[in-house]
């Protein structure tokens, strides 16, 4: 059907490439591009010989001119951005200049501050509308599938949804004393930032990791869950009828939290540049360089993830609850695509979101979050491409 340019060559990009090749009827040709072309070449060499044609290229995703030149040379129908969140805006600028559709998995973050907001990307709405192209924001799992789950619940089970609790649980064990399951810089910025939740029309900020509950999750058991800020709360607060409260919870082991606290206490999680031997360095970027590469964790990681949404609301005047979730096995993911489940659960929805736009199911000029489209074809594709979902109509609630 068409061509996709994939920007990025890390763990998530690897899953996207594998899944595009499994879906060759839609993705007839792909180009993998990143700052380090050898990583792109390694991905190509793993999958060469199938129906999907694979090209590679070197590009600096911070440079709009380089991006524009690459897009014009390759001629894609869509750009799949699985680079760093800092690069969302330059890639969107390049898509505007070339008239090509866009999809990403996480909202823009300014490099100088840990701030998670959609305002910078939502500001592109009018320009994308005038250009006649689509920008699909946050088509990973969270954000992404969690928004699709919310739209699905709203469409099929509720007249109004009053509360959403998003729970992201990882019971995997990689054997390292301390490592992050996705980009260390982004992960640590996320968990050390103040938490927040949406309630009665406003966001209420909390101290980092200060609110904890225990929740018994299907297939992985009781886990400590901590309240964090997460970007999909911002879009769901605008797009879900009757919403009164949204909270986002994530699991962390005590070992992870202890290591993180020590690193924070000695300044290693800071994003403020410091002088070191006559050079400016950012401590968190240095820490990222010495921690294990998340893409290397696949063969070591055992266990499962469980990510889903617990809804409370009303249907036909009666209160009801609903829980929809996916359980993903790290080792099964590694056997299939050579990546652990964290990359897998982000990469599969990125491919599906691109497919939705390319096939016209979610094609509409402007800038949109996933919950603004019909969830049914996306939900169907989740099961087909490796992320089957399960339902519970009487779940335990989080107080």
Image (spheres, rainbow, N blue to C red):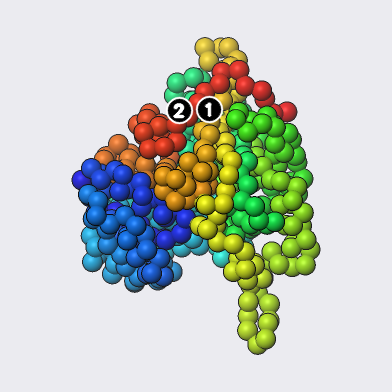
Outermost residue toward the bottom in this view: 278
Which residue does the image show at 63% across and 47% down from the upper left? 173
Percent position (x, y) of residue 288? Answer: 60, 65
Percent position (x, y) of residue 192? Answer: 69, 55
Q: Tell me if mark 1 has few (under 14), some (14-19) or many (20+) residues whose alpha carbon lies within 10 angstroms of its own.
A: many
Judged left or right of residue 343, residue 135 is left
Cα–Cα gap, marks 2 and 1 = 10 Å
Which residue does the image show at 36% across and 59% down from the upper left? 43
Percent position (x, y) of residue 38? Answer: 38, 69
Residue corresponding to mark 1: 324
Q: Nearer the viewer, residue 8 or 328?
A: 328
Q: Secondary structure at mark 1?
A: strand
Q: Cβ–Cβ below 8 Å for labels 2 and 1?
A: yes
384 up-or-down from 141: above or below? above
Residue corresponding to mark 2: 152
User: Would residue 134 be visible to someone looking at this image?
Assistant: no
Q: Nearer the viewer, residue 275 or 117?
A: 275
290 up-or-down from 228: above or below? below
Q: Tell me if mark 2 has few (under 14), some (14-19) or many (20+) residues whose alpha carbon lies within 10 angstroms of its own.
A: many
Residue 39, by quadrant, is: bottom left
């Amino acid at each position: 059907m068409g061509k996709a340019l994939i920007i990025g060559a890390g763990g998530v990009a690897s899953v996207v490439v594998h899944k595009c090749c499994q879906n060759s009827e839609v993705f007839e040709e792909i180009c993998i591009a990143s700052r380090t072309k050898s990583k792109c070449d390694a991905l190509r060499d793993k999958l060469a010989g199938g129906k999907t044609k694979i090209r590679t290229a070197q590009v600096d995703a911070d440079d709009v001119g380089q991006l524009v030149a690459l897009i014009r040379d390759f001629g894609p129908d869509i750009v799949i951005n699985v680079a760093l969140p800092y690069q969302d805006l330059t890639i969107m600028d390049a898509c505007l200049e070339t008239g090509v559709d866009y999809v990403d998995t996480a909202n823009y973050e300014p490099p100088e501050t840990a701030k998670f907001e959609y305002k910078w990307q939502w500001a592109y709405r009018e320009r994308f509308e005038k250009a006649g192209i689509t920008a699909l924001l946050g088509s990973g799992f969270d954000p992404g599938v969690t928004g699709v789950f919310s739209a699905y619940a709203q469409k099929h089970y509720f007249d109004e949804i009053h509360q959403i609790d998003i729970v992201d649980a990882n019971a995997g064990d990689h054997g390292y004393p301390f490592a992050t399951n996705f980009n260390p810089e982004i992960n640590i910025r996320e968990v050390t930032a103040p938490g927040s939740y949406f309630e009665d029309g406003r966001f209420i900020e909390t101290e980092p990791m200060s609110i904890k509950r225990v929740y018994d999750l299907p297939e992985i058991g009781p886990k400590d869950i901590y309240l964090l800020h997460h970007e999909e709360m911002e879009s769901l607060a605008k797009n879900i009828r009757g919403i009164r409260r949204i909270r986002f919870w994530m699991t962390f082991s005590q070992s992870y939290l202890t290591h993180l606290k020590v690193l924070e206490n000695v300044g290693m999680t800071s994003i403020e540049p410091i002088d070191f031997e006559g050079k400016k360095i950012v401590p968190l970027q240095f820490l990222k360089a010495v921690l294990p590469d998340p893409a290397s964790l696949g063969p070591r990681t055992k266990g499962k993830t469980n990510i889903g949404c617990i809804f409370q609301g009303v249907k036909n005047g009666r209160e009801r609850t609903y829980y929809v979730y996916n359980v993903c096995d790290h080792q099964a993911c590694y056997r299939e695509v050579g990546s652990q489940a964290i990359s897998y659960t982000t990469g599969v929805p990125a491919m599906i979101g691109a497919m939705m736009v390319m096939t016209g199911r979610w094609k509409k000029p402007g800038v949109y979050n996933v919950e603004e489209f019909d969830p049914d074809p996306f939900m169907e594709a989740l099961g087909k491409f490796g992320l089957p979902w399960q339902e519970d109509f009487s779940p335990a609630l989080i107080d």
